[in-house]
Amino acid sequence: MATAISMSREELLERRKALLESVGMTYDELRDRALAYTLRPDERAAYEAIRSIDYLLGSDSH
Amino acid sequence: MKQSGVSTTFLVVTAIDGPGVSSGAPDDLVNRAEDFADDVTRTIAADVPFEDRFSAAVLDEATADRIVVVIRDPGTLEELSFPLYVCGKVRLRMFMKFECQWDSEHTFLAVEKSWIFVRLGDREKDDGHKLIPCRIWASVQLGIVVLLWSAGAWGADHRRRRPRLGHRIQLRPPVEIGATP
């Protein structure tokens, strides 16, 4: 059963940019609100997706 | 974006190079990632009503050594939670995500971090959501035990309807519980 998706670096970076635009925040702003537990569900979804992207790219800081 | 393997019944994603084209990521990593995602799906489905499927994302490069396993929307790739039922009704949403990496010898896939969130509500996006108390035990031998309870989460007006939910979810390989967020 196929359950793996491969994405290029460019696709991931493009998706990361689109996610930040969708919530209207910089990553630092998003992270700070996450640490303060003040994210709305859609913002938390974007935050989680961005962290996944950063992990895949090896640019995660957590 | 490419989807590896032969089944396209669940994950329908736009293919840049066309279906069936081999990934730039190492085949062993992709295969192991698929196995792990399927294993998580089977494990959850064996314990709770579960119609979703975990999938693994991997960087499409030969040097890739990391995967992220989570439930994704087939179209948008948005990371999703899944429902938990109390008395036949969806009362909770659980979000699970695993970040995994090859060991240096590429002999096993280690779970570096994992996240488990539980939210009160029956929809994926509910502005009235509440985080609820959730205690999680992790054990190498026993997998993970998740015990949920709703003390205070339903409010004083609903105390008589307050459900007592204890649920055990086993996960193999054992995972590390990451801090929230």
Image (spheres, coloured by chain):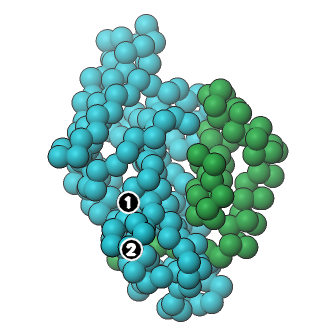
Chain colours: A green, B cyan
Q: Is residue A27 left or right of residue B60?
A: right
Q: Is residue A1 left or right of residue A17?
A: left
Disc 1 designates what residue? B110
Q: CA distance from mark 2 to mark 1?
A: 10 Å
Q: Nearer the viewer, residue B167 or A36?
A: A36
Chain letter behind tag 1: B
As drawn, the label of residue B134 is: none
| The quadrant where residue B60 appears | bottom right
The total of numbered circles placed on residues is: 2
Task: Give neighbour class at mark 1: few <14, some 14-19, many 20+ (Cα, 10 Å).
Answer: some
Q: Residue at x 23, y 46 (%)?
A: B140
Q: Residue at x 37, y 15 (%)?
A: B151
Residue B53 visible at all: no
Q: Secondary structure at mark 2?
A: loop
Disc 2 designates what residue? B106
Q: Position of residue A55 (x, y in %)?
A: 58, 58
Task: Give neighbour class at mark 2: few <14, some 14-19, many 20+ (Cα, 10 Å).
Answer: few
Quadrant where the N terminus of chain A is found in the figure: bottom left
Q: Is residue B30 left or right of residue B60?
A: left
Q: Residue at x 42, y 69 (%)?
A: B104
Q: Position of residue B152 (x, y in %)?
A: 42, 13
**Image marks 2 and 1: residues in contact by CB distance under 8 Å:** no
Q: Position of residue B72 (x, y in %)?
A: 51, 60
Q: Is residue A54 above or below residue B119?
A: below
Q: Residue furthest left?
A: B141
Q: Position of residue B48 (x, y in %)?
A: 27, 47
Three-letter amino acid code at the position of disc 1: Ala
Three-letter amino acid code at the position of disc 2: His
